[in-house]
Image: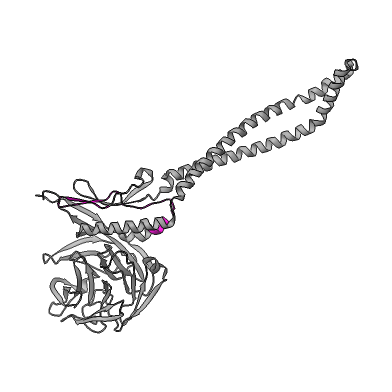
C-alpha cells in the first residue's frame, strides 16, 4: 500500500516578525483557519475559528495538506498589500474623496454667497427707494407723472439683475440640503467603521498571536519528524557581539517560555546573558547574567530542559549547568574526543565538540583519532551525560562548516563561508548516509554556529556578529486510513 507524502513548512521563527507587523496594522488578525490533522485514519480538530477569508484581504501564510487535500496546519495572515485590498481601507478612501468634494463645494458656495451678498447690500438702498415711490404712487396715482414713471421704471430695471441672484440662492439652498445628506451619511459610515475598528486593540492582537503560536506548536508536534528538503532565506534578528558566538532558546521547555541565551566568543568565555523574550534580545534589554564556574570552548552549546550543556575549555569534558540553581549538576569526560582545535570545523574556533538537541533528545558531534578525524555522533543521556549509542559517519570533520541534528539525522554543511550548502546527511535510524544539495543563503559570509531547535523548528545561526534564523521545510510521511 502506498503511503501519501506531505511537505511541511515550519514557520514559527517568523512569529516575532508577524507580531511586530501586526502591532503596526491595528485591524489585522492572525489565527488558525479550521486546522485539522489526520493520521492513521483518525481526524482531530485542533481549532475552529471564523476569521476573514482571503477574499477579504487575507492570505494563507503557510499550510500543509494530506493526500486528500485536508488541511493539516494553516496560518492565516493579512496580505502584504492588505491596505489596498481591505474593504475598510477602500471605504475610508472613498470617504476621503467625498469629504474633499464636499469641501470644494463649500468653498464655491462661500465665494458665491459672499459675492451675491455684496450685490444685495449694494441694491438695498435702491430697493427701499423703489418701495417708497411705489407706496406714494399707490396712495396718490396723480403724483406719478410721465417723468416720475420713467424714473421708477429705470430703477426697477436696475433691480432686475437681482432675480438671477435670488434664483442662484435657491439652487445653493438645494445644494446645501444635498451636502447635509452627504454629511449625515458620512457620519453614519464613520461611526460604523469606528465601532468595527474599536473592537480590536493591541492587547487582543497580542493574545491572538500567542494563541496562534501555541496552536501551531501543538500541530507541529503532532506531525512528528520529517526529512529536511529546504531552508528559507535568512531572517536577521540582531547584530551584536563579536564575530563568533552562539545564541539559542531552550529546545525542550514549553512554548510559553520565550527566554533567549547569548554567549559571545568561542573560548575562555564564562558570561551567559539570559533575556526574558526574543523582543528583549532584539533590543538588548531585560537580561540577567550567569557567570559559569568553568569557561567554555567553541560555540557548540545547547540549552536543554532548563540546563546549559557545553564543552569545558582545554578539555573533552562535558558540563551540565543548571540555570535556576546556578550550579553544575554533572561533569563527564567524552572518551577519546579531540579538543583544543585537534578536530574543529573548517572555521576553527575550538569547535571540536558540538552539543545539540532534536526531537529525539540530546546529542554530541565530535571526532577521535581512532576514527581518523571523521565525524562521530553520540546520543547522550541528559541526566548523567552517559553515551548511549555512537555512529561513525565517515565524513571528515575538518571539511565541515557546521552541522545540526533534525529528527535523528545529522546534516552537514560543506563550508562556513559564502556559497555554502547542506552537503551531507547521516541517518542514525538506518546507519546510512547520502550526499545532499540543499542551498541556503549565507548572508554575512562567516557562520560560526548553526543549531536546530526542535521546539520551534528553525535553525539558529551566529553569522559574522549577526544572529540569524532560518525556517526549515521537512518532507513528512503521514499514514492515512487503510495504510
Q: Residue furthest left?
A: 1
From the top left corner, tell me how far across and down residue 264 is, in percent: 34, 76
Residue in the image at 35% along x and 68% along y: 467
- Up-down: is 31 above or below 266? above
Residue 441 visible within the image: no
Residue 287 picture location, percent across and down: 39, 73
Colour treatment of the image? one colour
Q: Nearer the viewer, residue 90 or 414?
A: 90
How many numbered marks, from 0 up?
Answer: 0
In the rendered image, which quarter is residue 475 located in? Answer: bottom left
Q: Nearer the viewer, residue 440 or 153?
A: 153
Examine the rendered structure and indicate whether residue 97 appears above or below residue 252. above
Residue placed at 22% from the left, 47% from the top?
Answer: 70
Residue 44 among those drawn in magenta: yes
Q: Residue at x 17, y 63 (%)?
A: 435
Query: What residue span does the magenta drawing correspond to?
Result: 19-46
Residue 114 placement, left or right of 434:
right
Magenta segment includes 386 = no
Splitting the image into 4 quarters, where does residue 138 fall?
top right
| Residue 213, image quadrant | bottom left
- Image location (x, y in percent) of residue 201: 44, 54
Tell me: residue 89, above or below residue 378.
above
Measured from the top left, where is residue 188 in percent x and y?
51, 40
At a point 46% along the width and 43% down the height, the residue shown is 90
Amino acid at each position: 500500500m502506498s503511503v501519501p507524502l506531505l511537505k511541511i513548512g515550519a514557520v514559527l521563527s517568523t512569529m516575532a516578525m508577524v507580531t511586530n507587523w501586526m502591532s503596526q496594522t491595528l485591524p489585522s488578525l492572525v489565527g488558525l483557519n479550521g486546522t485539522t490533522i489526520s493520521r492513521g485514519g483518525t481526524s482531530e480538530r485542533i481549532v475552529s475559528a471564523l476569521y476573514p477569508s482571503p477574499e477579504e484581504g487575507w492570505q494563507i501564510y503557510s499550510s500543509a495538506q494530506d493526500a486528500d487535500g485536508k488541511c493539516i496546519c494553516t496560518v492565516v495572515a493579512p496580505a502584504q498589500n492588505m491596505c489596498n485590498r481591505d474593504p475598510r481601507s477602500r471605504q475610508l478612501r472613498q470617504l476621503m474623496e467625498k469629504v474633499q468634494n464636499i469641501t470644494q463645494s463649500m468653498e464655491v458656495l462661500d465665494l458665491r454667497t459672499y459675492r451675491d451678498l455684496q450685490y444685495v447690500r449694494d441694491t438695498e438702498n435702491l430697493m427701499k427707494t423703489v418701495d417708497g415711490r411705489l407706496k406714494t404712487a399707490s396712495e396718490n396715482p396723480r403724483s406719478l407723472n410721465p417723468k416720475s414713471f420713467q424714473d421708477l421704471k429705470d430703477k426697477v430695471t436696475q433691480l432686475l439683475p437681482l432675480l438671477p441672484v435670488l434664483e442662484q440662492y435657491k439652487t445653493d439652498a438645494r445644494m446645501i440640503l444635498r451636502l447635509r445628506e452627504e454629511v449625515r451619511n458620512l457620519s453614519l459610515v464613520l461611526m460604523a467603521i469606528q465601532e468595527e475598528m474599536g473592537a480590536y486593540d493591541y492587547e487582543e492582537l497580542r493574545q491572538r498571536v500567542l494563541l496562534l503560536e501555541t496552536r501551531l506548536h501543538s500541530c507541529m508536534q503532532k506531525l512528528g519528524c520529517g526529512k529536511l528538503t529546504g531552508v528559507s532565506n535568512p531572517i536577521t534578528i540582531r547584530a551584536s557581539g563579536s564575530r563568533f558566538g552562539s545564541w539559542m532558546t531552550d529546545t525542550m521547555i514549553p512554548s510559553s517560555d520565550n527566554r533567549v541565551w547569548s554567549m559571545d566568543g568561542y573560548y575562555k568565555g564564562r558570561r551567559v546573558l539570559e533575556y526574558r523574550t526574543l523582543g528583549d534580545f532584539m533590543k538588548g534589554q531585560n537580561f540577567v547574567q550567569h557567570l559559569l564556574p568553568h569557561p567554555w570552548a567553541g560555540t557548540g552549546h545547547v540549552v536543554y530542559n532548563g540546563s546549559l550543556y557545553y564543552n569545558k575549555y582545554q578539555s573533552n569534558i562535558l558540563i551540565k549547568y543548571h540555570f535556576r540553581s546556578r550550579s553544575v549538576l554533572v561533569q563527564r569526560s567524552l572518551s577519546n574526543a579531540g579538543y583544543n582545535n585537534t578536530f574543529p570545523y573548517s572555521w576553527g574556533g575550538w569547535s571540536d565538540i558540538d552539543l545539540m538537541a532534536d526531537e529525539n533528545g540530546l546529542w554530541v558531534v565530535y571526532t577521535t583519532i581512532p576514527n581518523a578525524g571523521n565525524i562521530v555522533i553520540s546520543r547522550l543521556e541528559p541526566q548523567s551525560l552517559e553515551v548511549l549509542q555512537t555512529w561513525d559517519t565517515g565524513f571528515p570533520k575538518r571539511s565541515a562548516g557546521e552541522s545540526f541534528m533534525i529528527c535523528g539525522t545529522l546534516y552537514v554543511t560543506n563550508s562556513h563561508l559564502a556559497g555554502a550548502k547542506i552537503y551531507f546527511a547521516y541517518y542514525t535510524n538506518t546507519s546510512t548516509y547520502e550526499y545532499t544539495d540543499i542551498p541556503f543563503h549565507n548572508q554575512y559570509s562567516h557562520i560560526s554556529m548553526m543549531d536546530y531547535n526542535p521546539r520551534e523548528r528553525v535553525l539558529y545561526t551566529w553569522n559574522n556578529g549577526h544572529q540569524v534564523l532560518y525556517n526549515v521545510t521537512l518532507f513528512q510521511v503521514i499514514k492515512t486510513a487503510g495504510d
